[in-house]
Each structure stands twice: as C-alpha cells, then as structure tokens.
Amino acid sequence: MNKIIFLIVFIVFAFADENIYKPLTSIPYDKKLAAVGKRLYFDVNLSPNKVSCNTCHNLNLTGSGTNNSGINSDNLTNPPTILNIVYSNLFFKDANITDLKEQIKRTLRDDMNITPDEFDDWVKLNVTYQRWFNEIGLAANYDNLVSVLVEFEKALITLDAPFDLYLKGDKNAISDNAKRGLKLFNFYGCSSCHNGSNFGSNIIADINTSFSEGCKLEDGKVKVPTLRNITITQPYTYKGAFKNLEDIVRSMAACQLGIVMPDKDVDDIIEFLKTLEGKRPKILEER
C-alpha cells in the first residue's frame, strides 16, 4: 500500500510546475525577544557543557546553520541547518517533534544538558542573564529562555532566493539551465519528497535499498531534509556521507530510481538547487 501511495504522489509531482511552490516570506516575531535569543544562542555559558546552540548549528563563517561537530546526543555527524526552521513541520532526524518550542526544549535537554529546574536555580546567580531578561521586561527563567530562542529562530529566514524572485514574477531571476533543472527536479520525482515552501522538513521517508545495498545511507525512515541553501550546508545526509552536490544527486537517482542520471540532467538540477540559496537573515547582521 505504501508503495502505491508513493507512486501516486510521484506521478502527481512529476507533472507539476513552479505553480506548486510558494516563495518564503518573513514571519512576524518580537524583535526585542529575538535580540536576547540571539545573544543566548551564541553564548557557550548557557550550557554546563560549555557548548552553545551555534556549536552545532553554526551561523558564522558560511552562515549555513549546520556543521560537522557530531556532539549531538543521537550521534549525528551532520546536524541539519537551522535556517528557515520556522517553515518546518517536523523536527529532528526521527521527526518526533512537530512544534518549534518543543524542538528547543528537546535540544536544550538532550544536547546541552539544560533542564528547567537546574536552569531556574542557576540563572538566579547569573547577573548578565538577569540584566538581559530584565531589559525586555521578562523574568530570567527557563520558560522565557525558550520563548526568546523561539523568537530568534523565527527571524532566521533566508529571503529573496533567486527561485523565490522567479516565483514572484521575475522570469530572469534564474537561468535557462536552472529552469530546465526545475522541470527535471519535478520529472524525476524529487519534489515528491522535497516539496512545500521549505523543499523538505515536512515528511519522513527512507532511502530505497532495493537497487543496491550501498544505498543504506540512513537507518530506517528519517525526516526529509530541506533543500533550501543546500549549496552551503554540505556535507549531505545525516551521516555526512557526501561532500558535494553532484555526488548526492547521482546517489539519489541511483538509489531511489535505479538509474544513472545523464550528466546534463545532473548539471541542470544542480543549477536549479543553487537558486534556493537566499540572503543571510538580517538579524545576524544586527548588533
């Protein structure tokens, strides 16, 4: 039954066009709370382990919102990007969380060793954190810690990607090769898993191993990752198995479809994927 459903979805998306996609738009957020959330996001003193949110989801350097640290509690070697996370419907590799606030709570608990009671006791002695929260009229406690981090994550949207400008009517925003890549992306069924405004992060799926045992790249069903900003979020897969786009595109074609994708098609799909890279979120430039 699952295979039949997948086949129906595949066929629907294979004949789709750009009208099935919507550009990213800003999400309203509280700027004062987000500013404090930003400070805490980058602060290694937040965790007794002396790691910050940024340790795994690095917004410095390339600004990818990911890295290769591998310190996560579930032994991920390639934490997913945090960019555009507010557009996700599912969180974590196992997709067990469906709420942005609960995603933060699980990260604080499992990856940073921060529990509500311990934080509430500890923060009473932290003069800096007390001042930060008092400046925005909030008590320094765990619940408000979660709230300010949520507001910061709402601000991490990469707007005005070339493809989004294309969707808004600028037909010259992407190249002819990228337009062909979009058609191929739909034709090969890539959009059956990578769809929605975030091009992923809204369903779970497993990688087909019927064509080759070498396709066992993940352990069972996992959350389908976003393709937004994929040009800066390498390596790819949760195990970090691939370091460049060409390899992962060819691998998905071989594993999911059992085909050797023509070089020209690979190149054009990559040209399309490049158009999903948006602008660095403004909040990261604000002081």
Image (tube, rainbow, N blue to C red):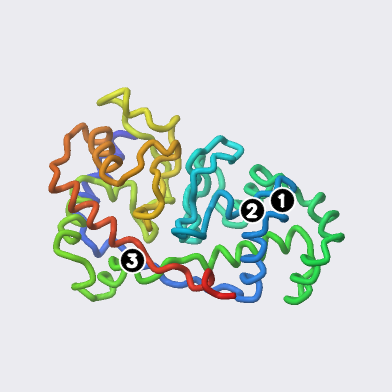
Indicate the quadrant where residue 209 lies. Answer: top left
Q: Position of residue 96 (x, y in %)?
A: 55, 43
Q: What's the amino acid at mark 3?
A: Lys
Mark 1 vs mark 3: which is more N-terminal?
A: 3
Furthest residue in direction front, as rendered: 61
Name the residue at 22% across, 56% down.
271
From where the camera sits, is residue 1 visible? no
Q: What's the amino acid at mark 2?
A: Ser
Q: Are marks 2 and 3 in contact (CB under 8 Å)?
A: no
From where the camera sits, is residue 286 visible? yes
Q: Position of residue 152 (x, y in %)?
A: 59, 66
Q: Position of residue 118 (x, y in %)?
A: 81, 49
Q: In this rendering, would 117 be left or right of 176?
A: right
Q: In this rendering, would 202 be left or right of 266?
A: right
Mark 2 vs mark 3: which is more N-terminal?
A: 3
Please give the label number shown on residue 47.
Answer: 1
Say above or below: 230 vs 252: below
Q: Secondary structure at mark 2?
A: loop
Q: Are marks 2 and 1 in contact (CB under 8 Å)?
A: yes
Q: What's the amino acid at mark 1?
A: Ser
Q: In this rendering, would 250 be left or right of 224?
A: left
Q: Position of residue 237 (x, y in %)?
A: 40, 40
Callout 2: 10 Å neighbours few (<14), some, many (20+)? many
Indicate the quadrant where residue 71 lies. Answer: top right
Name the residue at 63% across, 62% down.
149
Q: Which residue is mark 3?
A: 22
Q: Which residue is mark 2?
A: 52
Mark 2 vs mark 1: which is more N-terminal?
A: 1
Q: Secondary structure at mark 3?
A: loop
Q: In this rendering, would 180 be left or right of 93?
A: left
Q: Are marks 1 and 3 in contact (CB under 8 Å)?
A: no
